Amino acid sequence: MGILNPLYDAVSWIIVQFHSLYGLVFDKDGGLAWGLSIVSLVVLIRICLIPLFVKQIKSTRNMQALQPKMKAIQERYKNDKQRQSEEMMKLYKETGTNPLSSCLPILAQSPFFFSLYHVLSYIAQGKQVGVMSQDLVNSAQKAHIFGAPLAAKFTDSADKLASLGASVTDVRVVTVIMIVLMSASQFYTQRQLMTKNVDMTVKTPFMQQQKMLMYVFPIMFAVFGINFPVGVLIYWLTTNVWTMGQQMFVIRRNPTPGSLAFKQREERLKAKGKLKVEPAAQEPQDAAPVKRSQPKRQTKSQRQTGGPAQPAGAGGTKPKPGGGAAASTKPKPKPSSGADKPNLSKKK
């Protein structure tokens, strides 16, 4: 087995421990005890991978926050794809963002997946593997899930399936149903992330990558699933269901700002009265119009002396310059009569 021996030992040891636990309740040679052991293995691995899942969520949010800058780079270098890629990589490096972080949980599970695959393959051949004794190998080899042995595959021949105590029809029906459920759960999980927790209006390499994964992974599961033992199909179906539920919880409780899920969460909080909405300030519509007053008119003398201004349109005569108000009230002298003139004819 080479360098993977420690992983084979770890996976087989975990399965044996869970089988011992479930064997106290269910038939230790039955498919329920062995099937639940594989499911528990998945749950244990996924719990250990929660820190990676948190890192994946943070990376997705960082990518969402970078959407405006990424869109600006696309528009600026739309005719130069090489320069566009270089600027994108520079932006990722400056912000410490890794577009491949969304694949971390899957990549981290890969060693356990291959280890379980080989453990089940050895069980199908009746060979000891890891810490499993020959008695445990024989017990697991006889375990059936809905009529299909845990170590059976879709491509196995009728003779091989007969040696495991199963028919071709039972094995292929069970494996096809599991492959369909596995692919559908993977597609729904990725589609939920794309439609609810990211902004699809901005076309970036990250968005293209996520969209590609939405179709690539289900196809991969469908193509390669026919070569997986039933126990491995149980493993991947369980981990897909776990991922789907975990993602639904995170998107509902802590969605990415600006996404559809974020708007839906705000609406729920408003309906429950937990989110206060401040009303927008409105200008008064019935306010009285402002009256404009005409400037007071001043005479020339008032402008020169700084006297008080006379209201515009006021009555009265216009005072003469320099006379002021007193000059306008002074009586005019009466014309003198002829008697008052001196008699110049008597004077000689």
Image (cartoon, rainbow, N blue to C red):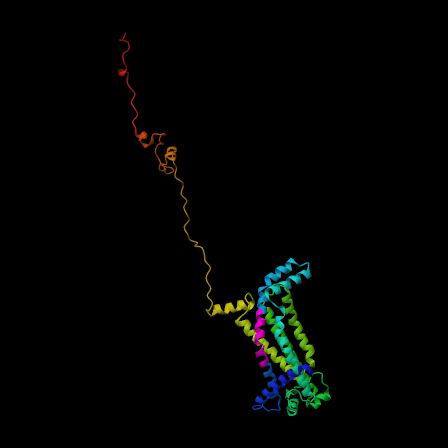
User: In the picture shown, does residue 343 fall above or below 62?
Assistant: above
Residue drawn at (64%, 83%) of the image: 6
Relative depth, front residue between 267 and 83: 83
Relative depth, front residue between 264 and 50: 50
Q: Is residue 127 left or right of residue 27?
A: right
Residue drawn at (32%, 29%) of the image: 327
Can residue 188 be seen here?
no
- Asked whether 55 falls inside the magenta stretch, the response is yes
Can residue 266 be seen here?
yes
Q: Is residue 223 left or right of residue 289?
A: right
Tally of marks = 0
Relative depth, front residue between 327 and 315: 327
Relative depth, front residue between 218 and 55: 55
Q: Position of residue 75 (x, y in %)?
A: 64, 58
Q: Is residue 60 left or right of residue 342?
A: right
Where does the C terminus fall, quadrant-wise?
A: top left
In the picture as drawn, the residue positioned furthest to the front comes out as 3
The quarter of the picture where residue 318 lies is top left
User: In the picture shown, does residue 293 fall above or below 108?
Assistant: above
- Asked whether 302 falls inside the magenta stretch, the response is no
In the picture as drawn, the residue positioned furthest to the top comes out as 348
Q: Position of residue 12 (x, y in %)?
A: 63, 86
**Magenta segment boundaries in residue numbering:** 43-58
User: In the picture shown, does residue 31 fall above or below 344?
Assistant: below
Residue drawn at (66%, 85%) of the image: 119
Q: Is most of the magenta stretch helix, strand or loop?
A: helix
Where does the N terminus fall, quadrant-wise?
A: bottom right
Q: Position of residue 195 (x, y in %)?
A: 59, 69
Q: Position of residue 153 (x, y in %)?
A: 69, 84
